[in-house]
Each structure stands twice: as structure tokens, then as C-alpha cells.
Image: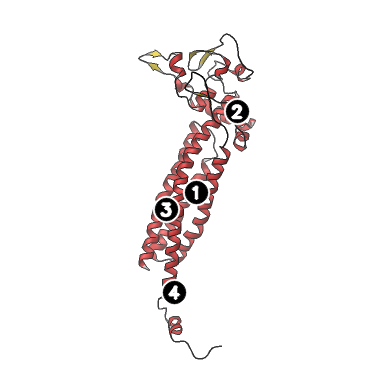
Amino acid sequence: MRTSNNLIGLVNFITFLLSIPILGGGIWLSNRANSTDCMRFLQWPLIVIGISIMVVSLAGFAGACYGNKFLMWLYLFVMFFVVAALIGFIIFAYAVTDKGSGRFVMNRRYLDYYLGDYSGWLKDRVTDDGYWGQIRSCVRDSGVCKKMGRRLHGVPETPLMFNFRRLSPIESGCCKPPTECGYTYVNETVWIPGGDMIGPNPDCMLWNNDQRLLCYQCSSCKAGVLGSLKQSWRKVSVINIVVLIILVIFYVIAYAAYRNVKRMDNDEPAGEARMTKSHPSHFEI
């Protein structure tokens, strides 16, 4: 029985450690929500799941240390629903970020982003007029476009150097005009009209060199936010999948150990009840 309790305690300690990357992923998303992605919702389910695993694991660890079968049972019962919630979050994260990605541009290293390439719940939420106003202000106030400037040995970046930069989705969608508009590069956030505008893209008319405006009203900016969210969610989901697999394995081990504790406890002498079992009465009612 002691061996089984020790095993349950070890499993609970490991699941406690596994809650740290889940909680860390939620905190990372929260930091990005305040500075880059500007989507203040997605991190909370992950933070709640991480804290739940941490608290339940501590309860199970205490139950194993003090031989409290109720706490062991509580760990198994609650952890079942926590694991189910984590599975649901992973499926949801992949489902809402399934469609959409940047488009390759000839003679450019960065990608261009188009809102029409995205669809589903996440797009509807980001493009909602009331919600987009908050996201736009967040992106502008984060200073992501101001931080794009580069100088090489005191010399500003040339157009050729800029063309071969890797830009984040938000930098590409919000801080410059779409490539198809034919604007001429002056610096990272200042562009002047070229010969002719090409293509019917409405964003070409929305671009403004005013650093408070840039392309924050453009559909490409909304697409850039969606692209950034997709990258963030996919990174966190990969970690969550690995943690989930390990959690399920240790949950099965803990369940088997708990069953073993119950079986051994039932087979041990237990006073009158055990004596009655060993020497049954000849009279039965």
C-alpha cells in the first residue's frame, strides 16, 4: 500500500510540474495580448486550466502523503474534467486558426496578408467594429511600427534590404501598404505613391504616412492580427499537446495505483468486519 501511495504522490508531483508550462503559455499569451496580438480573451482558459491542474495535483499529493483516499479520489475525479477541458481548448485553438496564412510576394522575403484568406469565429470577432477599435488602438499604442526602423552603421535601411526582411504579420499588415499597391519605399513606415496603383485593393487608398494612421484601418492590418494570433496559438498548442499526452499517461498510472490502494485496503484486517469475514456465522438472515 505504501508503494502505491508513493507512486500516486510521485505522479501528482509530476503533474504539478506539468501545470507550469500550461500556466506559462497562458501568461505568455497574456503578455502578447497586452503588447502584440491585442486579443484579451484567449489566455484566460489556459491560465484557469493551468491553475486547476496545479491545485488538484497538490491536493492529490497531500492525499498520497497522508493516506487520505478522499483527496486521491478528488484528484482523479477533477483531473478527468481538467484533461477534457484541455483537449477541448486544443481542438478549439486549431479549429479557429485552421484557415488563412500570408501570401508569398515576388522578390520579397516577407509575406502579405489578406483578410479574404481568413474565415470563421476568430475573423468575425477581430473584424467586429466595436472590438476592432480596441485592437487597433492596442496595436498603435504598442509601438510595433515605430520599432521597425533599422540602421546599418548609421545608414538607414535601403529598399533592397527592407524587401528581404522577415516581417511579423502585424508589421506587414499594419505598418506598410500592401505590395500590390505599388508604393515607393522611403523608410519602414513612410511610402509614397509609385507610377500607377495596381489592383482593386481598397487598402491602397487607406494608407497614410501619418504615424498615427498608417494602415491601421486597412483590411490587411486585420489579417495581420489574425496571422499573429494564429502563430501564437499554434506555438502554445504544440506545447499543450505534449503536456496533454504526458498528463493522460500519468493519469492512467495514478488511477491504477489508486485502484491498487483500494484493493489492498479491503484485504487488510479491519477489526470486527474482518473477523466476521474470516469466521462467518452459521446463521444467515
> Which is nearer the N-term, disc 4 or disc 1?
1
Counting from the top left corner in percent of width and height, residue 96 is at 58, 39
User: Which is nearer the N-term, disc 3 or disc 2?
Assistant: 3
Q: Nearer the viewer, mark 3 or mark 2?
A: 2
Which residue is rendered at x = 43% and y = 84% of the image?
A: 278
The amino acid type of the residue labelled 2 equals Leu
Residue type for callout 4: Asn
Q: Which residue is mark 2?
A: 115
Where residue 238 appears, as percent x and y from the top left, is 46, 42
Q: Quadrant of the N terminus?
A: bottom left
| Front label number (2 vs 1) | 2
Secondary element under disc 2, as helix, strand or loop, is helix
- Give above or below for 18 relative to 69: above
Residue bearing the label numbered 4: 266
What numbered label is drawn on residue 49? 1
> For the residue marked with disc 3, what is the amino acid?
Thr
- Apparent side of residue 101 relative to residue 278 in the rendered image (left or right): right
Gap in Å between the C-alphas at discs 4 and 1?
35 Å
Q: Residue at x 60, y 10 (%)?
A: 196
Q: CA distance from mark 4 to mark 2?
A: 64 Å
* Quadrant occupied by the C terminus: bottom right
Distance in Å between CA atoms under marks 4 and 3: 28 Å
Label 2 to label 1, Cα distance in Å? Answer: 32 Å
Q: Residues within 10 Å of mark 2 (few under 14, many from 20)?
A: many
SS for tag 4?
helix
Residue 109 in percent (x, y) is at 47, 22
Determine whether, in the image, residue 1 is placed left or right of residue 197: left
Q: Nearer the viewer, residue 277 or 145?
A: 277
Up-down relation of residue 222 to residue 270 (above or below): above
- Between the residue at mark 3 and the residue at mark 1, the CA separation in whole angstroms equals 12 Å
Query: Which-is-in-front pick, marks 4 and 1?
Result: 4
The residue singled out by tag 3 in the image is 15
